[in-house]
Amino acid sequence: MNSVIQKANRIIIKVGSSLVTNDGRGLDHAAIARWAAQIAGLRALGKQVVLVSSGAIAEGMLRLGFERRPTDIHELQACAAVGQMGLAQIYETSFRAHGLGTAQVLLTHADLADRERYLNARSTLTTLLRFGVVPIINENDTVVTDEIKFGDNDTLGALVANLIEADALIILTDQHGLYSADPRKDPDAKLIQQGRAGDPALEAMAGGAGSDIGRGGMLTKILAAKRAAKSGAHTIIAWGRDSDVLARLAQGEAIGTELTAQTGHLTARKQWMADHLHTVGQVVLDAGAVQKLTLEGKSLLPIGVVDVKGEFGRGAVITCVGEDGRAVARGLSNYTSAEARRIMRKPSAEIEAILGFLEGPELVHRDNMVLL
Ligand SMILES: Nc1ncnc2c1ncn2[C@@H]1O[C@H](COP(=O)(O)OP(=O)(O)O)[C@@H](O)[C@H]1O
Ligand SMILES: N[C@@H](CCC(=O)OP(=O)(O)O)C(=O)O
């Protein structure tokens, strides 16, 4: 038994190019229909699911008549743009058959490195999930060059797990999981059923991609598990051609390789905030706001702020201090320091009239805050 997926509420599922495009022969309609059916099953169990799908370049190559993967970056980008249309179309049709809507989300590294775009991506994804839609994510290959690429969708899957604090990352691939060596090269390789995400011994077992279709190979999956674990997400690597793979995992069956995260969400988040020792800004809270945060677990509203110190942008990590100067919390600011100064001491209902827009009624949302 393995209860990781059974217990998970929010799950990221990543499907690799070889699976999606039937080893480069073209979109695998039957496989995609099976994943859609199984994801609908997960949704019926109350789970939120985000799909990270590769395959745009492989499908685009086919549609544009390339026999070999082009080396010219712009030709690759053109392939991705063409192939992505196919992905969007087949996912929309396949999920529609189960009464589920889909949304296309194309991300780049720069989107997640920038605090403001990071928060926007996070809010859009969580809003889509709240609407019951299945977000389908891929890298925005059209606008990225080598230095600013995620590089592979295993990494992208892990970053999305961090972004929305998923409980689990399922990486579906063309092998049954991580083997002690690349099974394409070593017939005696054994399946590793369980491990600790971040264990360097696993990295030594994992090799590169065994085919021209996939990019990352097993190593990027192991590194993705390590990254996902930073926000408390467990990773399962499993065989995507098993027609019931997701349903079996949801029933608690131990299949594939499970790489467990050693820290829970909260510890990971606290750790992340704790890493931001040098916060650029401070907001001073009145006694009522300190009480709301520390005793009632509420968000910080501008009305409880009496002073704003330092200059910071939207999405910056700021420290919340009491009037006695004691730090009580740290969190991501929804507004810049200049905006915060204009809305402090004001009820949230007035924010829009004062600033001309509303990012949210809170200065720091509870979900983006850690008490110190
Ligand atoms: N230790 C290992 N265990 C399993 N597969 C491995 C290992 N080392 C390398 N591989 C290779 O990684 C491939 C999967 O990665 P990749 O081709 O990038 O797939 P995907 O398109 O699903 O991301 C496998 O087909 C296999 O040849
Ligand atoms: N954005 C690329 C994904 C490349 C990639 O990471 O592929 P894979 O190793 O098969 O997950 C595409 O859609 O073709």
Image (tube, grey):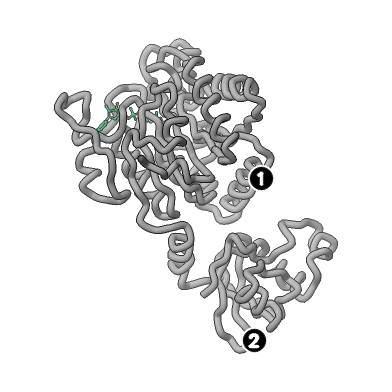
| Residue in the foreground of this view, choosing between 36 and 5 | 5
Q: What whole-number distance in Å separates the C-alpha atoms at marks 1 and 2?
A: 35 Å
**Quarter of the image containing the N terminus?**
top left
Q: What residue type is labelled 1?
A: Thr
- Residue 5, quarter of the rendered image: top left
Looking at the image, the residue that sits furthest to the bottom is 324
Q: Name the residue under label 1.
A: 127
> 10 Å neighbourhood of mark 1: few (<14), some, or many (≥20)?
few
Q: What residue type is labelled 2?
A: Glu
Question: Which numbered marker is on residue 323?
Answer: 2
Give the mark nearest the N terminus, 1 or 2.
1
Question: The residue tagged with tag 1: helix, strand or loop?
Answer: helix
Picture layout, residue 368 above or below residue 190: below
For the point 43% across and 67% down, the residue is 275
| Residue in the foreground of this view, choosing between 130 and 138 | 130
Q: Mark 1–mark 2 contact, CB under 8 Å?
A: no
> 10 Å neighbourhood of mark 2: few (<14), some, or many (≥20)?
some
Examine the rendering and report whether any part of residue 85 can be seen.
no
> 3 left or right of 92?
left
For the point 63% across and 49% down, the residue is 123
Residue 129: x %, y % from top left: 63, 41
Residue 282: x %, y % from top left: 60, 76
For the point 78% across and 65% down, the residue is 348
Q: How many labels does the image show?
A: 2
For the point 65% across and 79% down, the residue is 290
Residue 101: x %, y % from top left: 66, 29
Question: The residue tagged with tag 2: helix, strand or loop?
Answer: loop
> 205 left or right of 244?
left
Question: Which numbered marker is on residue 51?
Answer: none
Examine the rendering and report whether any part of residue 274 can be seen.
yes
